[in-house]
Each structure stands twice: as structure tokens, then as C-alpha cells.
Amino acid sequence: MIVSHNTSTRRHPERSGQALAAALFWIFGALLFVAPFYRAPDALGEEGLDAGRNAEMDIPFTQDVADFTADFEIDLAPAMEEASEEFFGLESPTLISSGVIHAARVRSGEVSYMRHCVGCHGSTGDGAGPATRYLDPRPRNFRRGVFKFTSTVSGGRPLPADIFKTITAGLAGSSMPDFRLVSEERRWDLVEYVRYIAMRGEFEQLALDIAWDEEELPDFEEAAEIVLERWSLKKVKAVYPAISETDYDADSIERGRAMFVDAQGANCASCHGNGGAGDGPAADGKTDDWGYPLKPRDLRPGTYRAGQEPADLYRSISTGINGTPMPSYLGAFEPEQIWDLVHFVQSLAGTDGGAR
């Protein structure tokens, strides 16, 4: 038996070699994926995890609170912590009675968030997780309540379905992956947790902004009422195309092109360029709401982060994209004109003017 075993081993050395190579390949791949999440703060530079920040407007929240305390000799941090728990803790009567959140889903969603999302979006949802410095565009900072891809009016808070869509499908052309392999139930739990940390963060940021404006402790109850009103599902409504899609034909595309390039029309070309390459005369120097550089979308690949369906493009043009210079055209043009713009944008896909 011993002789037979040794003979077999000698005859097939390539099997063990292949297995070892495969194991090393997967180990190496795993290390490449997780390395950004486990680097020590010292390895990130003197600023630690905040080294990924590079804009004046995106000052870390705790630093901003400390600056306020130093400037006005008012210890804001303990008052802020107490008020945040009073109005947005999961046991808060104010939060529970408002009906804006499902507390049971929030608790379950936190588990999934810490497993799937914290590395990029950070434990507080500030978009400054340990992997942030390696990603462009940056992960979303939820703490101002600003979500770029929504079905709601410009400046409005997202519907739960909007966040669910982003979690499920990801965002094409960015580092945000799809999570279709996570069960639907857990994805809805994640939606509630993201909504929860977004509204709690928005409350804390609003209270801090008021404190800076008034140079004193803010009225926390008033700030809580404002935020809960903004997130109320009774107030947040979706924008749907006002009419069914018009015919996609050469005439519609040409009308859309004329509006796209006309400075007195939609004037899209000023940023996106006449050919949709994102190279318009006003393209340079654009920033998002946090002061980070932002380039207008190159429309030629036909990849749109808000979704690939015509109705998705219609909503993006109608409502604009929150947190960016992309304006809302809702009310500025007739629904038929917006469909013409949609068709022209679609005609650019593949481009050099590719077809639908």
C-alpha cells in the first residue's frame, strides 16, 4: 500500500501543482480585494482615513463640531449626541410616531450594511470608508440627505424604491456594484438602514449648520421636525413621464438635437458638448455639492447610472441629478420635448451616432 501510494503521487505531480496554483490565485485575488479595507491608518498618511477627503465643503463632521466648540466656547458635541438619540434613536417616540421608518428592518439592515457597505460608505454613511481613497467617483455621502439618482422632484428625498433599485442594479460606470445575490428581503432591510442613517445624519448636519449660523446651540426639536417632514412618505412623490413615450424616429431625434445644442433651449451642449462627449465649453471646473471635481457625462457609451430605460432618461432630464450641476427641466419644456431630448441622447449611444 505504501509503495502504491508513492507511485501514484510520482505519476501525477501536476495535479498537486495545479491545485496549489489555483489556491494561490484565489488567495492573491482575495488579498487584492480586501487590502484597502484593512490597511492601518498610518499607511494612509498622516490624516488616516480622512486622507481621502480633499474638498473644503466635505469637512469631517466631528472636526466641524470641534471647530464650532473652539470658536464659540460652546460644547456642542454632548448636546448633539443627546438630541440625536432623543429624536432619531430607534427607541425614540418622535421617530416611531412619525412613521417614516421601519425600526425592525433598520436593525436587520445594519447587519447587512456592516457586511457589504461600510468599507466604502463608512460606518456613519459619510462616504469616507477605508476604500474611498481608491475610488472615483467617491462613494455617496448620505449624511446630507442628497441622493443623485431618484424618481422624485429636484432636491427631494428618494423613495425607498429608488434606493432599492440602486442597491439591486448598482450604478453603471462607477464602483457601486449590484447586490442581486443578496436576498430581496435583506435588500429592503438595507434600504431602511440607509434611509435611517441618512435622515439621522441630515438632522445632525442641519443642527450643526444652524448652530454656525446662529452662533449658539440650535433648536434641536425644530431641526428634527424639518428633517422628518422632508423624509415623510406622504410628501415624497415620484415623477412619472407625463405622457407615454412618443415615436422614436429621425424627426424626434432632430428636434432633440436642436434643443440639445441651442443656448436658448435646453443648452445641454454647453456641458456635454455637441456630440455628447462631455467636452462642452462649460465642462471644466464643475463640482458636486461637496466641492469635488465632477465631469459632465460622456453620453456616447450609452451607459446611464440612473438606468437604461427611456423612462429613466426622461426622469433624469425632468428632475435633474441632485448634488450636481445637472438642472431640472420639469416645467421648462413640454413632455413631448423631453421625449425628443431622450431620443437624441439615445441616438448618441455607440457612437459615432449609434442607433437605438
Image (cartoon, helix red, strand yellow):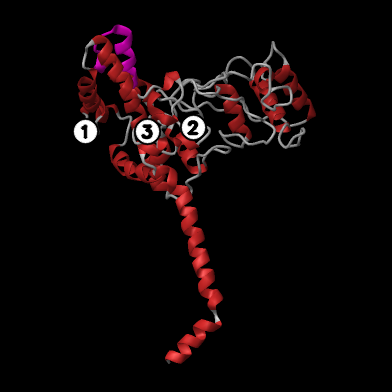
**Comparing marks 2 and 3, which lies closer to the viewer?**
3
Residue 228 in view: no
Pointer 3 residue: 48
Quadrant for the C terminus, please: top right
Q: Position of residue 220 (x, y in %)?
A: 25, 17
112 on left or right of 344: left
Q: Is residue 332 magenta?
A: no
Residue at the spot x=40%, y=25% of the render? Answer: 145
Q: Which residue is mark 1?
A: 91
Q: Amino acid at mark 3?
A: Gly
**Splitting the image into 4 quarters, where does residue 353 fall?**
top right
Distance in Å between CA atoms under marks 2 and 3: 17 Å
Q: The residue tagged with tag 1: helix, strand or loop? A: loop
Helix, strand or loop: magenta stretch: helix
Q: Residue furthest top?
A: 214
Q: Is residue 212 in the magenta section? A: yes
Q: Residue at x 50, y 73 (%)?
A: 16
**Residue bounds of the magenta highlight:** 205-221
1 and 2 marks in contact (CB < 8 Å): no
